[in-house]
Amino acid sequence: MDELARDDGTGRLWFTVRQAAAFLGRSVQTIYSWERRGTLTDPRRDEHGRRIYTQAQLAAAERAVRPRAARVLDSRAA
């Protein structure tokens, strides 16, 4: 299995769910959670039928969850 993100020839990198988790330092379950919640949307499929996302999609999802994560951590510290 290819462990690296794929370049589609236009400079975009595509990541499977497992690769995305490793790239972002998150768990695979976190990526699936983002999918269920609608934070990470519009996946394409690779030749094996696996969902793949661009680096830009992953960055947008990471930015979207950051404010909520900060609130949760702040409430736990109080």
Image (cartoon, rainbow, N blue to C red):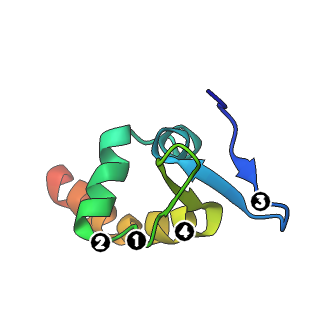
Q: Which residue is mark 2?
A: 38
> Is 65 drawn above or below residue 19 in the view shown?
below
Quick one: which residue is furthest to the top in this view?
A: 1
Q: Which one is earlier in the sequence, the residue at label 4 or at label 3?
A: 3
Question: At x 83% / y 64%, what residue is drawn?
Answer: 11
Q: Which one is earlier in the sequence, the residue at label 3 or at label 2?
A: 3
Q: Which residue is mark 4?
A: 57
Q: Which residue is mark 3?
A: 8
Tell whether label 4 touches label 2 (CB within 8 Å). Answer: no
User: Element under label 4?
Assistant: helix
In the rendered image, residue 73, in percent from the top left (x then y), is placed at: 25, 54
> Is 60 drawn above or below residue 29 in the view shown?
below
Q: Quadrant for the C terminus, please.
A: bottom left
Direction from residue 26 to residue 37 in the image, left or right: left
Identity, as a three-letter code, of the amino acid under mark 2:
Gly
Identity, as a three-letter code, of the amino acid under mark 3:
Asp
In the rendered image, residue 37, in percent from the top left (x then y), is placed at: 24, 67
In the rendered image, residue 44, in percent from the top left (x then y), is placed at: 51, 64
Q: Which one is earlier in the sequence, the residue at label 1 or at label 3?
A: 3
Q: Which residue is mark 1?
A: 41
Identity, as a three-letter code, of the amino acid under mark 4:
Gln
Question: At x 77% / y 59%, what residue is drawn?
Answer: 8
Q: Which one is earlier in the sequence, the residue at label 1 or at label 4?
A: 1
Direction from residue 64 to residue 73 in the image, left or right: left
Identity, as a three-letter code, of the amino acid under mark 1:
Thr
Tell whether label 2 touches label 3 (CB within 8 Å). Answer: no
Q: Which one is earlier in the sequence, the residue at label 2 or at label 4?
A: 2
